[in-house]
Image: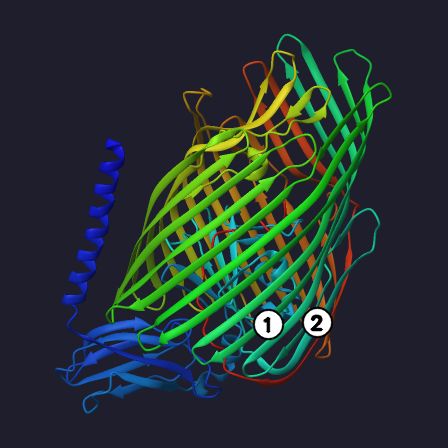
Amino acid sequence: MKTSVIFHKQFAMILTCIALTVSFLANAQTTEKLTGTLLNASNEEPVPFANAVLYQLPDSIFIAGTNTDSDGNFHLPFSGNSPLFLKFSYMGFENVILTLEDSGELDLGKVYIRESEMVLETLVVAGEKVKGSTEGGKAVFLINKQHVAASNTGMDILNQIPGVFVDFNQSIRISGKNKIIIFVDGAERDHRYVQQLRAEQIDKIELVMNPSAMFAGEADAVIHILLAEKETGFSGMVYAELPISRNEVYSFPTASLSIYTPKLHAYTSYNGAFSFFDVTQSYERKIFGEGEILTDQQTRQRSLSHTLHQGLEYAFAPSTLLHGYLAASWFSETHNGNITLQKNEMEPWIAQRQEKDWNRSVTTALYLQHEFNKEKDKGITVDWTHSRLMGENRLTLLHEEESFVNATRPEQKVSNLKVDFRTRLTSAIRLMTGFQIQQQHFGNGHENSFDFKSSVQALYSTIRWKKNAWDMEAGLRTEQIHIQTANQDKKRNHLYVLPNVRMGYVWNERHSARFFFRSAMVYPLFHQLNDFEATLDPYTISFGNQDLQPYIYYQANLEHTWNTGNLMLMNSLFFEKRSNVINSLNSMNTSGLMEVTFDNLGDLYQIGLQSSGSLRLSKSISLNHMIRIFHSSGVGNEIENFPSRDRLAMETGFSGIMAIKKDITITLRFRYLSPVYDIQSNLFSGPLYFVAGEKKLGDQWKVGLTSALPFSRKFTYYGLDTKGDEFYQRAIGQINMSRIPLWFTVNYSFQKGKKVKKENRNVSSGLHINKRGF
């Protein structure tokens, strides 16, 4: 009780300090803001990241400077006490100078800048440059013609962004992070929605590597996809991936149709996912003093997924937008084959593995955006999502003398309501605040009566101050979670206070620096809590742990960005700590069986260097890279008492695009993660790379060939070295491949109509919902 009183006093003091800071900054701001939008005179498109510098006459004394944002907007302090002039400059454009001596206007409206005729030859290249920049807490990448030429779908576009990698299962990883929230025009979506987008639809992509207090605490990173200006008329796409060999089937077909009017956008689409592979899973387990167990499991993986999307977007007025969305999915994944187990010199245990898996899910969402006052950037967004998943999973190990059956009927319900409000308090200070409510219910069928309920309530506020070259943001997020399971009548309540800070400084259009500090929460997942006991083989069982506790982690980054137009380079020093992390726990029980479960094992640390960026070598060649070199260490807690372990690790990835004659584009993607220590285990995987070629046939058709891991014959998708007091185990999972796996791709796209002005969208920053399944 005493601790609760002290906490509430401390929390009240924090809120009071924030309020006093806002009041002080608001009263101290005596200058007004000079605003406007910089546009290309030839096509009236925004000119992002241009220099805007304010000078005092008659001696051209520097007063203030800034860069236009991704929409061409600029904000500069303006006192009006002396004659001034404003200068705009950007590579490939003529300078623009505006004299403000006789003007009392604070809003300059549209300012036009013309392309330079003297560098016309360079402009052809500039039109395809890597147009990327850091803006506040995000990195912004504009999609150019070369990206589109090398891509068919939205997932293909993501693969061309520095640090982003999409693997065999269409899972997204960004610079070592895999809990990614995706937004499309402000509304939360999943990777299946991105898959059905046409590459031509995407205008720019924003990456938030250190999400602020406005985003869910469990999010590692955020991707915001902004679509190009909509068209009146209609557009669509049919895309297919056709395997040439039956040994490996890797196909993600898509079909979509959209109809546009100036106020209405209706769309429907389908996307599938089919992955058939021959898989080998094995482990070698050495039990100290008792010998060893060897297993070899040969199966055929069959993954099937079908998803239908329906959406309707309507603009009631220039300031009000409503978007309704419905998605229905059917999917399954099975591994059928044989398993052979050998313990010491005993007769081999041979069984047939038979698996049945069937799941269906429905997601409905409503997104509302309303602008009260666009000049003051005052608006509200409401994002509601409801998702339900039901499944039936049955695994049978058939042996001539005994059989093992594992059967479950998982059910998941997740509802999420998110309301965000933002306003500009002064010309330099912006306030964003909101609340969030999420309800989750997980259940299990058959003989196991697992039942899990949780409720999360979150309150958060972020204050952003931007003046001249400085940009600062401070946020506070409070999350309260109530957890109840079937075997625990009493609810478990947790309250967390999560501060976030960001500071940035822009020297000029080429150099900028940012510092981030972030604290966030990670909650247990369904399969980690589900205490249903499954038999994996005669000597191994697995089950969840209902006593798992959420854990907190901290991140700090110091980053420098260098942008020359043809080169965008982001280098950073990072530190990360995960306290009392949830991880897999392996141990031997008194019956000699291996138990695989989950527990809060201890602390994980990472400290290192990271570099990512884009380089345009020539008009036809561009490269993206990401490399992380870090020291990884794990320290067991007092309960599990694992010894401290540490090692140097590296993660690297790169992608390249080469455009050659006759509308042919070649792309290459590569990723590798070296072994990394966990608390109890050592994780590793093999290198993964793709090579693809695309040929454009007219304005609507595109054909191509894709190959994954040519000449490798095997891909190690997971590896695990685990050591306990009584055993050592090495487990490996591999996909068996043809010498040169090939997939034929064909894409037909169409569009007709005029372009209209697209309304700006604000990200709803909702809680992440696992829409895929368990």
From this view, report whether residue 127 is shown above or below residue 579: below
Toward which corner of the image does residue 191 lie, by quadrant? Answer: bottom right
Three-letter residue code for mark 2: Met
From this view, report whether residue 583 is shown above or below residue 225: above
Which residue in the protein does label 1 denote?
312
145 to the left or right of 351: left
Going by the picture, which residue comes out furthest to the left? 81
Residue 280 point in image, percent of width and height: 75, 34
27 to the left or right of 66: left
Kindly report which numbered mark, 1 or 2, lies closer to the viewer in this rendering: 1
Circle 1 — which element? Answer: strand
Name the residue nearer the viewer: 629 or 581.
581
Name the residue nearer the viewer: 173 or 307.
307
Going by the picture, which residue comes out furthest to the bottom? 102
- Earlier-in-chain disc, 1 versus 2: 2
Q: Quadrant of the N terminus?
A: top left
222 to the left or right of 726: left
> Is the residue marked by circle 2 packed among few (<14), some (14-19), or many (20+) residues within 10 Å?
many
